[in-house]
Amino acid sequence: MEGYFRKREKAWENPSWRNLLGTWATVPLFVLLIYSWNADRETAKRQKVASATIVAQDPSNHQCYEYAFRVKSASYSGCEFPQHPAIGNEIQVFYDPQNPTRNHVNDFNEVSEGELPFVPIPLLVPVALGIFIWLRRRSYRTAKERAALKEEL
């Protein structure tokens, strides 16, 4: 077992820049986060408010509370975690007037701001790995140069 770990450690003494290729998988995640944040931000500009009634608790969906509301004589529903939940209670629901099936118990401004801190993470992963590889390669190169200098003396 000791030989395995030594081989793995040795492989990272002088890592290849090809290791950064795996971080390209973070690009779709970055695009998805930006799209989601922007969609919620745009919805916040046109959101409407409706009164909803909590109709049930869904144990199969992390104990979320199902609610129902009406917009222009059409019924819509959602499943969220409202404050002070109790079946039969009235709650305030924010919805997109263009698509009332897109609704939330929180203001869409709050929802979009909650997503924003996660946007830089997919960018930080490749940058951090790139810095790590650069530092490891630099220390490997300087150690090699020091060994060569010792041999000359």
Image (cartoon, helix red, strand yellow):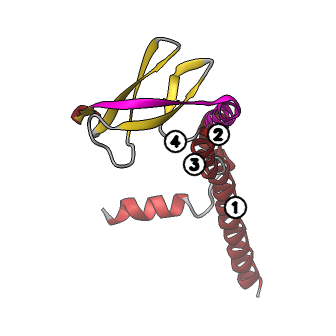
Rendering coords of residue 62 (x, y %): 29, 39
Mark closer to the observer (1, 2)? 2
**Among numbered discs 1 and 2, the one appearing first in the sequence:** 2
Residue pushed farthest top? 73
Residue 106 badge = 4
Q: Are marks 4 and 3 in contact (CB under 8 Å)?
A: no
- Please, what is the three-letter code of the amino acid marked with disc 4? Asn
Mark closer to the observer (4, 1)? 4
- Please, what is the three-letter code of the amino acid marked with disc 2? Phe
Please say if 76 is above or below 132.
above
What quarter of the picture does the C terminus occupy?
Answer: bottom right
Residue 45 badge = none
Mark closer to the observer (1, 3)? 3
Q: From the image, give the main secondary structure of the stretch colored magenta.
A: helix
Residue pointed to by mark 3: 114
**Among numbered discs 4 and 2, the one appearing first in the sequence:** 2
How far is disc 4 from disc 2 in space, using C-alphas? 24 Å
Judged left or right of residue 39, residue 145 is right
**Among numbered discs 4 and 1, the one appearing first in the sequence:** 4
Judged left or right of residue 72, residue 63 is left
How far is disc 1 from disc 2 in space, using C-alphas? 20 Å
Which residue is at the front of the view, 3 or 98? 98
Label 4: how many Cα within 10 Å (few below 14, some 14–19, many 20+): some
Residue 30 badge = 2
Mark closer to the observer (4, 3)? 4
Queried whether the magenta region covers residue 98, the answer comes back as no
**Among numbered discs 1 and 3, the one appearing first in the sequence:** 3
What element does badge 1 sit on? helix
- Please, what is the three-letter code of the amino acid marked with disc 1? Ile
